[in-house]
Image (tube, rainbow, N blue to C red):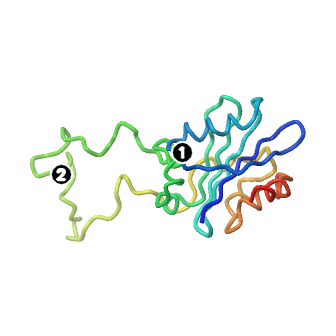
Amino acid sequence: MYFAALLARTEDGWEASDTELDDVETLSDLADLARESTPDDDTVLVLIEQEDAWFGVVRIDGEDDPRIYVSDAAAAARSSYGEILLTDELLGRDPADDGNDLDALDLDGTEDGETDGDGEDGEEDGGSADAVPHGPVGDVGILDDLGVTKKELLSLSADAVTEIADALGASETLETVR
């Protein structure tokens, strides 16, 4: 089960709204949705969690590029909402590299300088360039100035969204949309 909410910091404090992500297909769509939730260039946090699997925080400050943190990239990669957050940039991939560069293939189907998948000991090589790492990715300092340190963010677990809201002083506001 998923939960997604927007928290917008206004001069009167935090305002929360639940959000449907059904029409959101890209990070850009998500950022636009967040920006539309506040009339000013206030800080907006998009909090997304899948019970006991992963959570993500997207921070939008005015027209700045979104900042992203995902608690477990591999778990999020198995989720349609997680895939929105796991951009090539966040994962350290070259967006131009789609893995289908036929010019780099030798006649035997391997890339230049690669073996055919068998290591020197005859066993299959592990890992892939497109493998998504297990564990956190992104900006661990995303909430530092709001009272959630890197260490605290990395230690959050099953009820992370509630714990973040508590630290921001927005737990009652968040509960109104939960």
Of 166 and 173, which appears nearest the observer?
173
Mark 2: secondary structure:
loop
Q: Check disc 1 and report its element: helix, strand or loop.
A: loop
Residue name at image x 17 percent, y 45 percent: 105
Query: Is 118 left or right of 28, judged from the image as shown?
Result: left
Q: Position of residue 46 (x, y in %)?
A: 67, 47
Residue drawn 51% across and 63% down? 75
Residue 16 % position (x, y): 78, 48
Instruction: Using the image, determine if residue 64 lies above or below residue 18.
Output: above
Q: Quadrant of the C terminus?
A: bottom right
Disc ID at residue 65: none
In the image as oriented, which residue stretches furthest toward the left?
A: 107
**151 or 101: nearer the eye?**
101
Report the amino acid beneath label 1.
Asp
Q: Amino acid at mark 2?
A: Thr
Residue under pointer 1:
23
Characterize the local packing of mark 2: few (<14), some (14-19) or many (20 or more) Cα atoms within 10 angstroms.
some
Which percent across, then down, holds residue 65? 61, 33
Distance CA(mark 1)–CA(mark 2): 40 Å
Marks 1 and 2: CB-CB under 8 Å? no
Disc nearer the start of the sequence (1/2): 1
- Mark 1 Cα shell of 10 Å, populated few (<14), some (14-19), many (≥20): few
- Which residue, as the protein is rendered here, is positioned at the far right? 12
Asked whether, in this view, residue 175 is left or right of residue 102, the answer is right
Please name the residue that numbered disc 2 is placed on: 110
Judged by depth in the image, the label closer to the viewer, 1 or 2, is: 1
Determine the residue positioned at 46% across, 61% down.
78
Q: Out of 108 and 86, give the one closest to the viewer.
A: 86
